């Protein structure tokens, strides 16, 4: 039985993933988000209990022998994995072992301005950081961060990290009803994410029981809000896909892709048969191109 390894689990965003939990016994986080799937807990700025690297590596070696077909090894925690004091060394040891698997971390981004954390995250193939709001009042209400955490530092840290990181940076925004679900919030978010320039943005809402009484927004709201995000490939995280296929002429397809790249799921849900044929025509003519962003395929203007 593993103490630190879980899965594999199939994730539509990142592929077949084997997880490593750096805080399996209790929540240790510098946020206490309203939507957290774990119980609410006092925030911390350091882990008090954590496994040794060797303990994790022993379990990981065994798991990789058994599950050799996974796509990604995901570092996560009941809390915030960048609070783990030996993150860089751990990532280096996993890199020496993982062959063609990708190494991913799911972080809340609170410590991204910290140079040691940046150095550790440079070891990863994919870094996923949360950014629920760029408005201090909303950030404070929703993510309930430890007093040592500052939103301005997070945003500057994300910009700085995006400049030096050569692999794939994914930002994730989780939308909560009546908190960060207005057009104004997303206009501000759009300005900031276009300065950070991540590889991809994942947009989602609550879909599991949460620590505090908060409500999800509808899929339609996510779709409306997503229209405010320009230029950056964006994925709406949804359990059940909703198809709403329409006819697009070639100019409309070009306009849509100029505004923002669209994933293969978007095309499947939005485009009718004729529009898909037109899209393929544009692809063959070299007007449209296909790119992969942290495991998801997008159509974009060449
Ligand atoms: S950052 Fe993650 S673990 Fe920490 S409180 Fe928020 S949702 Fe929970």
Image (cartoon, rainbow, N blue to C red):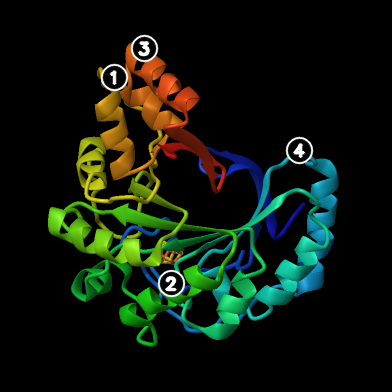
Q: Which of label 2 and label 3 is nearer to you?
A: 3
Callout 3: SS: helix
**Would you place residue 191 above or below residue 66 in this image?**
below
Along the horizontal axis of the image, is 27 left or right of 211? right
Residue on which the image places disc 3: 273
Residue on which the image places disc 1: 245
Callout 4: SS: loop
Quadrant position of the C terminus in the picture: top left
Q: Earlier in the sequence, mark 1 or mark 2?
A: 2
Q: Are marks 3 and 4 in contact (CB under 8 Å)?
A: no
For mark 4, does the 10 Å Cα neighbourhood hold few (<14), some (14 to 19), or many (20 or more) residues?
Answer: few
Q: Which of label 3 and label 4 is nearer to you?
A: 3
Whole-percent x, y for residue 126 in the image: 58, 57
Whole-percent x, y for residue 211 in the image: 35, 59
Residue on which the image places disc 2: 158
- Ligand 1 closer than 8 Å to label 2 CB: no
Tell me what residue is drawn at x 22 percent, y 71 percent.
135
Residue 201 visible in the displayed image: yes
Residue on which the image places disc 4: 69
Callout 1: SS: loop
Q: Earlier in the sequence, mark 2 or mark 3?
A: 2
Tell me what residue is drawn at x 64 percent, y 63 percent.
124
For the residue pair 75 and 233, the one nearer the viewer reads as: 233
Q: Earlier in the sequence, mark 3 or mark 1?
A: 1
């Amino acid at each position: 039985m593993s103490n630190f390894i879980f899965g594999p689990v199939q994730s539509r965003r990142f592929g077949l993933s084997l997880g490593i939990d750096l805080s399996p016994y209790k929540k240790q986080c510098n946020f206490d988000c309203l939507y957290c799937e774990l119980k609410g807990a006092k925030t911390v700025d350091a882990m008090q209990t954590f496994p040794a690297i060797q303990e994790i590596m022993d379990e990981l070696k065994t798991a990789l022998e058994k599950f050799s077909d996974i796509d990604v090894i995901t570092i996560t925690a009941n809390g915030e994995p960048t609070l783990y004091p030996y993150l860089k060394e751990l990532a280096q040891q996993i890199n020496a072992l993982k062959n063609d698997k990708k190494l991913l971390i799911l972080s809340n981004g609170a410590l991204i301005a910290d140079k040691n954390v940046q150095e550790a995250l440079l070891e990863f193939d994919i870094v996923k950081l949360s950014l629920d709001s760029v408005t201090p009042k909303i950030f404070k209400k929703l993510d309930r961060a430890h007093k040592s955490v500052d939103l301005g530092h997070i945003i500057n840290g994300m910009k700085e990290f995006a400049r030096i990181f050569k692999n794939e940076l994914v930002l994730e925004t989780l939308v909560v009803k009546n908190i960060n679900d207005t057009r104004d919030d997303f206009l501000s978010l759009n300005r900031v994410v276009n300065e950070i320039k991540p590889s991809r943005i994942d947009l989602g809402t609550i879909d599991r029981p949460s620590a505090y009484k908060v409500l999800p927004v509808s899929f339609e709201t996510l779709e409306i809000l997503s229209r405010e995000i320009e230029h950056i490939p964006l994925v709406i995280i949804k359990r059940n896909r909703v198809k709403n296929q329409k006819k697009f002429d070639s100019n409309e397809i070009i306009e849509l892709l100029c505004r923002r790249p669209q994933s293969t799921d978007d095309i499947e849900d939005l485009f009718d048969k004729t529009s898909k044929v037109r899209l393929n025509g544009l692809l063959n003519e070299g007007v449209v191109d296909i790119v992969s962003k942290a495991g998801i395929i997008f159509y974009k203007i060449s």
